[in-house]
Amino acid sequence: MSFFFEVLIGGLLSGVLYALVALGFVLIYKASGVFNFAQGAMVFFAALTFVGFQQVLPGWTGLEAGGRAVFWLAFVLALASMVVLGILTEKVVLRPLVNQPHITLFMATIGLTFLVEGIAQAIWGANVHGLDLGIADEPIEWVMDSADIIVSKFDVFAATLAGVLVASLALFFQYTKVGRALRAVADDHQAALSIGIPLQHIWAIVWAVAGFVALVAGLIWGARSGVQFALTFTALKALPVLILGGFTSVPGAIVGGLIIGASEKLAEVYVGPMVGGGIEGWFPYVLALGFLLVRPEGLFGERHIDRV
Amino acid sequence: MLYREAGQFKASYQEDQQIFPIRQDRIGFAAILVFFFGVVPLVANQYWLQAILIPVLIFSLAAIGLNILTGYAGQLSLGSAAFMAVGAFGAYNFMLRIDGMPFLVGIVLGGLCAAAVGVAFGLPSLRIKGFYLAVATLAAQFFIVWALVKFPWFSNHASSGVITAQRVEILGYAFDSPVSKYLLTLAVVAVLALLAKNLVRSTTGRSWMAVRDMDVAAEVIGIRPMHAKLTAFAVSSFYCGVAGALYAYTYLGTVEPEGFSLDLSFKILFMIIIGGVGSIMGSFFGAAFIVLMPIFLNVVMHSVFGGAMPAGMGSNLELIIFGGLIIFFLIVEPHGLARLWQLGKEKLRLWPFPH
């Protein structure tokens, strides 16, 4: 039984990470109706930029390598790069495509994926980098002693961080002026525009926030499995999460992430051996597909009715 | 002066409905066929045939497949490579397990396998559309490649999952040389492309386009969306499947399931975006562009940097240029290279007078 819980908790914790990436999708989709396939590439770009700055900063500024100052400076610089990237994307790619069909925008973000991946590697190289956030990936002792379940400190830290991030985003959307404007834009572009909400600013802010989320996700994933090209696949992990949770719902991304994370690990452990293993790659998709057939708008999505 | 349709009157329905209503087009098309069937095999060397012409033709076929689904029926798919894999492995197994299976029947059966799988994964399209469907086709992509690796039966229990295509033989004639393989590929692709060109003009094709443009309205005027979508999935997957079989038999010779990766699917998507969404001709342009681009880049980079090119820079540059081009085409010329072709023809029609 404790093995089951161990798998379940491990799954839930990795689900939090999926949710974090999915959150970036939801933010942009909600505010601009763009399904940003490049979110995974942005995660990769963010993590690589952070690690890259961490390496070059001591040489540029004379700061002590690996110290706190370097960490935060690199964080700020990486965040700035993400904001610039986001705003450039909005200006160069999306604005000329306003009013195009959604599929066109989606294909443009696939192009953007390649572009961002290429640029990231052209600047910082294609090597695999380690990333140390200062939190050890070791089991928490008292949990292991009392319940005989191995739970990694790092995973708990990551989950807490993700939780804090989601909560603060929710508060931001709920209680600040910008947040209110964002929700207005999400509901109806035209109406928001007509009451004087500057659309371009809002979109720039959304892309910047999405860049920030990508940076956090990139740091956590990078610390977990190294900063490398494989980070771009986080986008592919986040897609079934979105389907399950609905494209427009922040809580949906979280719940969907948890469900996908848990079910994927459980399926791998308990169903995998029956069919030869390695089903983690497609199981979330099939789960999401099955779910779609029952409820096409996702758990928390808005029901869409077609009228002639 | 040369490209003028004045004086070409149509006196029967038959004439009115031909694929190429203008005489110059017919002559031009015949000239192109003669050139590729007759002249190219005589002048092209082995490198051109095997590294450029054959893959361009095969990818054109796959792009036509995806174009039917995405360009004509409006259903975005990211799983074209998986359907190619089904075609390749299907054809391989038919040839392996049935004695004396003729090659052409084998690849058609492989294509039919792909069509069946395509319809199965197209079923969700009845309830979902857009991005949701794109994710559903991603499921196909991952599931099929996984299944081909995990069940050794598909690759005849080869330890590495790699299949080696059997000898291609039609009526006792062995297609071993590059020229013969090229001609075989060209013949298959030409026939299927012509078929596709006709199909998209037919009732089926028009119902696809109606569903693409507005599905609810299409339903109101009596088109069955379900039927249209599923036939689009079937035909599209069939084309991808045949392309996959050719990929294994006339291009590479040995293939493994992992070769049909998501990257290949993206490449095929890029072909139709650059070539022209919703255009058979565009599929050829796009495939040629995507195949030739890296080769061209390589040549340019070598002449600029010489041997001192930083490692990996070529592939990064390729990513950047591909990504940039996709965005560029979507913004500037959403109808792709095919539109330029069309514009050229329209200009020629008026030439030498601008108006």
Image (cartoon, coloured by chain):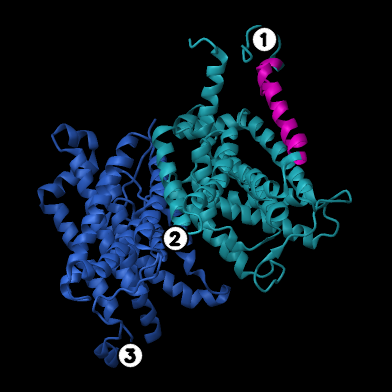
Q: Quadrant of residue A218?
A: bottom left
Q: Decide: is A212 above or below B275.
A: below
The mark lying in front, picked from 2 and 1, is: 2
At which x and y percent is residue A164?
A: 19, 67
Can residue A243 be seen by looking at this rendering? Answer: no
Residue at 60%, 43% (x, y): give it.
B65
User: In which quadrant is the C terminus of chain A drawn?
Assistant: top left
Q: In the rendered structure, which segment of residues is drawn in magenta?
A: B15-42
Cβ–Cβ below 8 Å for labels 1 and 3? no
Circle number at residue B310: 2
What whole-number distance in Å separates the C-alpha atoms at marks 2 and 1? 59 Å
Q: Quadrant of residue B91?
A: bottom right
- Chain shown in cyan: B
At which x and y percent is residue B102?
A: 82, 51
The residue that disc 3 covers is A148
Circle number at residue B8: 1
Taking depth in this image into account, of B260 and A81 the one nearest to the observer is A81
- Chain shown in blue: A
Left or right: B230 with respect to A143?
right
Please state which amino acid type lies under the numbered disc 3.
Asp
Neighbor class of circle 3 (other Cα within 10 Å; few <14, some 14-19, many 20+) is some
Please state which amino acid type lies under the numbered disc 1.
Gln
At which x and y percent is residue A301?
A: 32, 51
What whole-number distance in Å separates the C-alpha atoms at marks 2 and 3? 52 Å
